Image (cartoon, coloured by chain):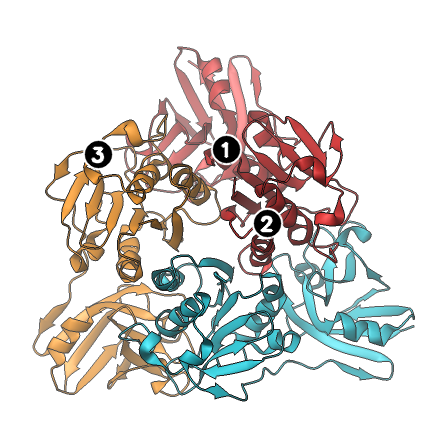
Chain colours: A red, B cyan, C orange
């Protein structure tokens, strides 16, 4: 119960993440802190939600996931703890947990209000260090989450671009591009397999057509485009040995269509 | 007593930080190493001093702070250990500790000379790995700092741009810009509050006027400039939901003036 | 036996490294994970080999070095464990271990095939998380490496540019440029000292001549070029207080010659 994962937009060029870790270890010196990512684009809640959704399930049960992308810090937005079957999540109530909680639904949600557990004086500009970090640290030590505030019933949802199906065509879009230039869509494995059944398909992106799903990047020749279900269960378009983003000249928001042949 | 914080300009694209951590853990396998920042601009002692000053106090008492920005590595510049009320600092004697030690004054300073504790052979180009890391590791295991060399009385200071007060105007400058484009000045909370008293103020930066101090970014409308005391106790100019650096076209060194109305 | 070092090209802007660490800690919660580098240029096996070679020896004996730059993931390329005198290495069989194993020769090599130890279902696009991480975690817990597959006799080598010697001139090239713009050559200390003996030399790079080896950057005036054996035992060209890459306008592949005078 001592693992705390961190996902933030605090970057690695300042001292924000170091201060958060220090605050955690001051309360729980046995905490094992694991960075999921700190290079989330400043204030990009959707990107953080996506990265958290991909990684959270690989952690040991009882891990605490601390997610801080918090453009409304210091405002009246809530600060929440969410307990699910296997994990605790601590975050501002702004949708950042939206994708993870689709896979792992909330069992209990608490509105963090008990300032007994905050750093003093708590700033209004860095709740990551002064409120969220201590709360996560105390949870990782076994403190009951009801200590931090009242139960609440609903939290903010995350709006994502929708996948549409019409006239035998499934249309989604690129919602994330990784370091390798791989294009990750909002079409997940279940959606895609339900749509395809046992039929043949063609996949369209920009001016390219890909005529099957492959299992690995190397299933096609070097520098050719490939479509596959990626290791986080989304439909992904890649270039074997290259960058699909650069080769295809594609950015976030680009449409991807799948057509039954 | 097992926490060692690291702040360096070694970056994350090489293997320098990994080698330092390996060297620490070889001596103290129980050390808990926390990165404050490794993306300090190469050889920018002032930036490191600023980031260390912001973060050090959040660590547990007895933590060892290892700070290595060391343009004179291999020269006759001293290598020092500084003991303060709550912490140990290990660093080249070049001013890098200057700001932290203003807040937490030195109790004892040792000139590191005892090569019994160095990696062998110690290079003349990477004291971070060969000298500072082992020394920090031994301190974190409880070794008395007098083991590493003789006490000395003075260390090098850090020259910072001064805040000036004249004709009812307090003038400082931007000394740091964070990942979000927030502009951090050299005017700290105490200075500012002493100057203001209970009077009204106006804050001037470039061609903008801000007519009060706020408590949080969200205290102003989206994309409007806001002035506040930041979470590290400095006067900061920000744009709610944006980058002050980009919006105001301001860089390090830009003047900030506060005028009593 | 609980240290696992990581070197990958997964970067820090995605969640890949976080997922790998989570997978390791789920199997061995006591593992101490140390990042050597994740910013290896995508798919640049040689760069990873170079960085691993520089760092591996600073780790405690029995550490497990996990190296994943894996352009052929999902293909028939082997996945290997290499046991040496002091360490275990886990990696795709693509040459990434080539330089480290020159210094620390293999005692036993195992072809990883036993999927009992893989995450299920193991993807064909992210063996770092699904295969290499669990295998490294089990080794760090003391599992015998023969559990993971059969012994094999040979592994893939790494092709590096060769150092040539002719007519009293030793010629190598820049194979790595670090964050500071220092130019690291493929000429190692032993090669160089054997060539020099007790004679005088001149070192040529682009249009510059350097007339001796120094011990530290500061051995020359500010902003002057300096040649030295760096802290990883390679001949390095630097600029005291500056970037040799920028000042000399030199990139990877640039020739460096040493001439006996």
The one nearer the camera, B24 or A156, is: B24
Give the image location of residue B3, x and y in percent. Answer: 49, 61
Give the image location of residue C211, x and y in percent. Answer: 24, 86
Specify few, some or many for label 2: CA neighbours under 10 Å numbering under 14, 14-19, or 20 or more. Answer: many
Task: Tell me whether marks 1 and 3 sit on the same chain.
Answer: no
Residue at the spot 44% in from the left edge and 59% down from the top edge? B31
Residue at the spot 44% in from the left edge and 63% down from the top edge? B11
Q: Which residue is mark 1?
A: A61
Is A261 on the left or on the right of B175, as rendered?
A: left
Whether tag 1 and tag 3 are in contact, CB under 8 A, the answer is no
Q: Which residue is mark 3?
A: C147
Is A89 on the left or on the right of B188, as rendered?
A: left
Label 1 or label 2, whichever comes before in sequence order: 2
Spatial separation of the CA atoms under disc 3 and disc 2? 41 Å
Task: Tell me whether marks 1 and 2 sit on the same chain.
Answer: yes
Q: Is residue C172 above or below residue A228?
A: below
Residue at the spot 70% in from the left edge and 70% down from the top edge? B185
Give the image location of residue B60, x and y in percent. Answer: 58, 61
Between circles 3 and 2, the one closer to the viewer is 3
> From where the camera sits, is residue A73 visible?
no
Where disc 2 sits, the SS reads loop
Specify few, some or many for label 3: CA neighbours under 10 Å numbering under 14, 14-19, or 20 or more. Answer: some
The numbered mark at residue A9 is: 2
Spatial separation of the CA atoms under disc 1 and disc 2? 25 Å
């Amino acid at each position: 119960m001592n693992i705390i994962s961190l996902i933030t937009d605090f970057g690695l060029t300042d001292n924000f993440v170091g201060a958060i870790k220090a605050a955690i270890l001051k309360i729980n010196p046995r905490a094992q802190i694991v960075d999921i990512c700190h290079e989330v684009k400043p204030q990009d809640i959707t990107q953080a939600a996506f990265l958290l959704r991909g990684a959270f399930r690989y952690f040991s049960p009882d891990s605490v996931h601390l997610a801080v992308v918090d453009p409304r810090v210091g405002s009246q937005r809530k600060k929440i703890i969410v307990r699910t079957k296997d994990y605790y999540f601590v975050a501002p109530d702004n949708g950042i947990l939206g994708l993870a909680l689709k896979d792992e639904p909330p069992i209990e949600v608490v509105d963090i209000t008990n300032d007994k557990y905050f750093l003093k004086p708590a700033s209004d500009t860095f709740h990551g260090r002064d409120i969220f970090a201590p709360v996560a640290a105390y949870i990782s030590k076994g403190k009951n989450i009801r200590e931090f505030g009242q139960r609440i019933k609903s939290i903010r949802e995350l709006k994502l671009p929708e996948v549409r199906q019409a006239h035998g065509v499934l249309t989604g879009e690129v919602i994330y591009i990784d370091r390798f230039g791989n294009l990750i869509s909002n079409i997940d494995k279940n959606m895609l397999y339900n749509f395809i059944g046992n039929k043949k398909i063609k996949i369209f992106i920009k001016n390219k057509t890909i005529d099957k799903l492959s299992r690995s990047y190397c299933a096609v020749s070097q520098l050719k485009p490939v479509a596959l279900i990626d290791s986080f269960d989304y439909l992904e378009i890649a270039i074997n040995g290259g960058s699909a983003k650069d080769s295809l000249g594609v950015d976030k928001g680009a449409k991807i269509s799948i057509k039954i042949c």
